[in-house]
Image (cartoon, grey):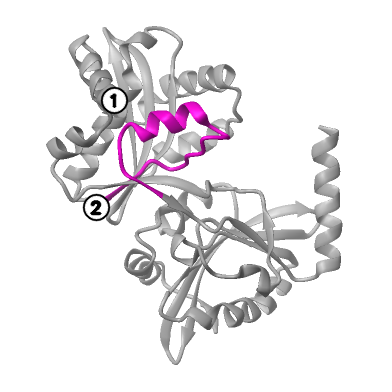
Amino acid sequence: MWQIIDSLEADDFVKHYGASEFLQSSAWLDIQRQFYSVETLGYYLDKELMSVARLIRRPLGGRFCYYYSPRGPIVRKTHYNLWPQLIKDLGPWLKERRALFWRLEPGSNWLDYDFASLGFYHGPDIQPSETRVLSLDSSPEELFSRMHPKTRYNIRLASKRGVTVRRAGPQDFASLWSLLLLTSQRDNFHLHRREYYLALINSPAIELLLAEYHGQVLAAGIFAYWGDTAIYLHGASGNEHRELMAPYLVQWQAIQLAYELGARRYDLFGTSSQKWPGITRFKQGFGGEIVHYPGTFDWPLSKWNYNIYATLRQWRRKKH
């Protein structure tokens, strides 16, 4: 059965069975708690913890809502047939909270599972369903030697031309926000609200790295370090001195920091040759292996109500 569990116990489970999935960590939930109501549930079978789900409540208008588990729940792979029971037993909990559906994103180890057979609806990706993960089992020198020659060249160029990278903090938020705005306008992507990025860089699990040239901030990166995994969450760069290749040096410093902190994996977080060809080429240059996820699914408590929601959502998107 599902029940609220201690956050530290949940963290230990996620680190052991979920490859230190940051989006199912207490650190991520502490950030989300500043904007949404959140819960940590564990599923026990014969007094043994089998699954952990961090759930974020998202309002839908009125008293209705849905619950979202980013890159979760974490489920022991040894219990392959546990999914139907997990879903069924969470139903009463969701109904009690007037949720229309549960939005979930199973881990990469469930890529071959037939979620459609459980009544799941495949929805648009919230978190990327493809990423590139770099193993940190080798020394930084060996990692550098395996990178694409052009990537190595750009890292050396930035360093040789005088670009430096430092670990920054909340006092540098104005510089970060300015770069995010420029990047959003230039590359035509949606920004989160200002307070979200401020909450990120105030988290003890987050590092903000800034690349500077003669006192001018050229590029920034927001990185998560939790368990034995480091994740590249967000990046931004200015419009000046782009020939200095500052983002490459930021990324390389983040990888070296991950190695120093004892991480075993570095997740470049999100690649797609079709959606983001430029950023995908950038990330490919650092090496690593592509990892696929099953994607984002919705499990409705009522198919009738969910279909109404889906129709209205589609209508609103067309209207805007």
Q: Where does label 1 land, which residue?
A: 151
Quadrant the C terminus occupies:
top right
Q: Amino acid at mark 1?
A: Thr
The residue at the point 73 percent across, 73 percent down is 95
Q: Where does label 2 land, which residue?
A: 264
Residue numbers of the magenta segment: 265-290
- Residue 171 percent across, percent down from the top left: 36, 26
Q: Is residue 287 magenta?
A: yes
Quadrant the N terminus occupies:
bottom right
Image height check: is 269 above or below 247? below
Asked whether 176 or 87 is in front, the reply is 87
Picture quadrant of residue 48: bottom left
Alpha carbon of mark 1 to alpha carbon of mark 2: how far? Answer: 22 Å
**SS at badge 2:** loop
Picture quadrant of residue 100: bottom right
- Residue 243 percent across, percent down from the top left: 35, 9
Q: Is residue 108 magenta?
A: no
Ranked by sequence position, the earlier of labels 1 and 2 is 1
Q: Is 58 on the left or on the right of 17, as rendered?
A: right
The residue at the point 37 percent across, 35 percent down is 284
Disc 1 vs disc 2: which is toward the camera?
1
Which disc number belongs to residue 235?
Answer: none
Picture quadrant of residue 288: top left
